[in-house]
């Protein structure tokens, strides 16, 4: 099998990146696309080592070029290592990364939520107190104005607290918040995934069953329809199940799914980061 390898040395990660046009089954799960018309496209796969064990994957479009960038937040030193963009110290151990576009400039901003004091620290923007210990940060554009809103989901009472917008009861203590735009109105919808029954509860949209206990919700726009598709990654078999889309095997148990637009075509791609090796496995198309 032909392989193209490019070695990249980073002062930050001291990591070599291996770009591949094909991924051997022994290295990652094979991909199986069952094709819907919307998803029919050339498939490209590649891998790159970026990160160390203990890092938190935070892939997103930090450069504003419409491509998701490989990135990790390292709690041990508070640095963000963004491939092709730069390295930035922003945060301390215990912080929860919360990168989003808070300034409506088309670039994702580096940000953290600090559970110990309920503060948000947004690089280049400011600091804001919003939340309590135990809250889960869920910053998204809930009102469609192009700016990410500071928000938290509180498992202890099932409330969503969205700064400048309102407070909404929606969820139970063990639900996983999955806010996305599920109806193409350019506003992010409040939603939760319930692992106990595989249920998706989307405020103002509906309730759906898609997934099993142990699945990881990975809702995103895989079909380029302008709305998020219900989707789960199943660690037990490495499959991605996309409602109304294709089923693809990509990943192994222990991988952390990081769906994003790595191909620059507006389509969410199946991507996993492997903590044990620091390698990203990217399935574009």
Image (cartoon, rainbow, N blue to C red):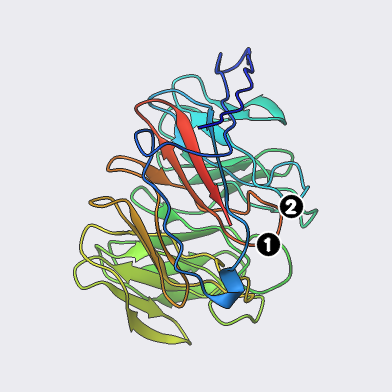
Marks 2/1 in contact by CB < 8 Å: the verdict is yes
The reply to whether residue 35 is in sight is: yes
Mark 2, other Cα within 10 Å: few <14 / some 14–19 / many ≥20: some
In which quadrant of the rendered view does residue 124 lie? Answer: top right
Look at 59% across and 46% down and name the residue there.
99
38 or 69: nearer the viewer: 38
**Front in this rendered view, residue 95 or 274:** 274
Residue 254 relative to residue 58: left or right: left
Give the number of the disc on residue 190.
none
Q: Residue at x 31, y 61 (%)?
A: 155
Cα gap from disc 2 to disc 1, whole angstroms: 8 Å
Mark toward the start of the polypeptide (2 vs 1): 2
Quarter of the image where one finds residue 83: top right
- Left or right: 129 in relation to 168: right
- Which residue is drawn at the image coordinates 68% and 47% (left, top)? 61
Residue bearing mark 1: 266
The local crowd at label 1, few if under 14, some if 14 to 19, many if 20 or more residues have their Cα within 10 Å, is: some
State the residue position of label 2: 66
Q: Position of residue 260 (x, y in %)?
A: 57, 53
Q: Position of residue 16 (x, y in %)?
A: 56, 18
């Amino acid at each position: 099998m032909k392989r193209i390898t490019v070695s990249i040395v980073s002062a930050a990660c001291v990591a070599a990146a291996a770009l591949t046009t094909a991924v051997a089954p022994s290295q990652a799960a094979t991909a199986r696309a069952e094709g819907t018309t919307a998803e029919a496209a050339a498939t490209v796969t590649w891998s790159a080592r970026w990160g160390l064990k203990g890092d938190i994957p935070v892939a997103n479009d930090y450069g504003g070029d419409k491509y998701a960038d490989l990135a990790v937040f390292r709690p041990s030193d508070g640095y963000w290592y963004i491939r092709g963009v730069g390295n930035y110290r922003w945060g301390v151990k215990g912080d929860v990364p919360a990168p989003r576009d808070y300034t409506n400039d088309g670039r994702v901003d580096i940000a953290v939520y600090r559970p110990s004091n309920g503060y948000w620290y947004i690089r280049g923007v400011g600091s804001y107190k919003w939340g309590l210990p135990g809250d889960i940060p869920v910053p998204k554009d809930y009102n469609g104005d192009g700016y990410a809103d500071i928000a938290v989901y509180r498992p202890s009472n099932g409330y969503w607290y969205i700064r400048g917008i309102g407070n909404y009861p929606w969820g139970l203590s063990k639900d996983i918040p999955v806010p996305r735009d599920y109806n193409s109105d350019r506003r992010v919808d409040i939603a939760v995934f319930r692992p106990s029954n595989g249920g998706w509860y989307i405020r103002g949209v509906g309730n759906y069953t898609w997934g099993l206990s142990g699945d990881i919700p990975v809702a995103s726009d895989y079909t380029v329809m302008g709305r998020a598709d219900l989707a789960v990654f199943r660690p037990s078999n490495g499959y991605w199940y996309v409602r109304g889309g294709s089923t693809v095997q990509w990943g192994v148990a222990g991988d952390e799914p990081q769906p994003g637009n790595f191909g620059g075509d507006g389509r969410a791609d199946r991507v996993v980061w492997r903590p044990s090796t620091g390698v990203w496995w990217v399935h574009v198309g």
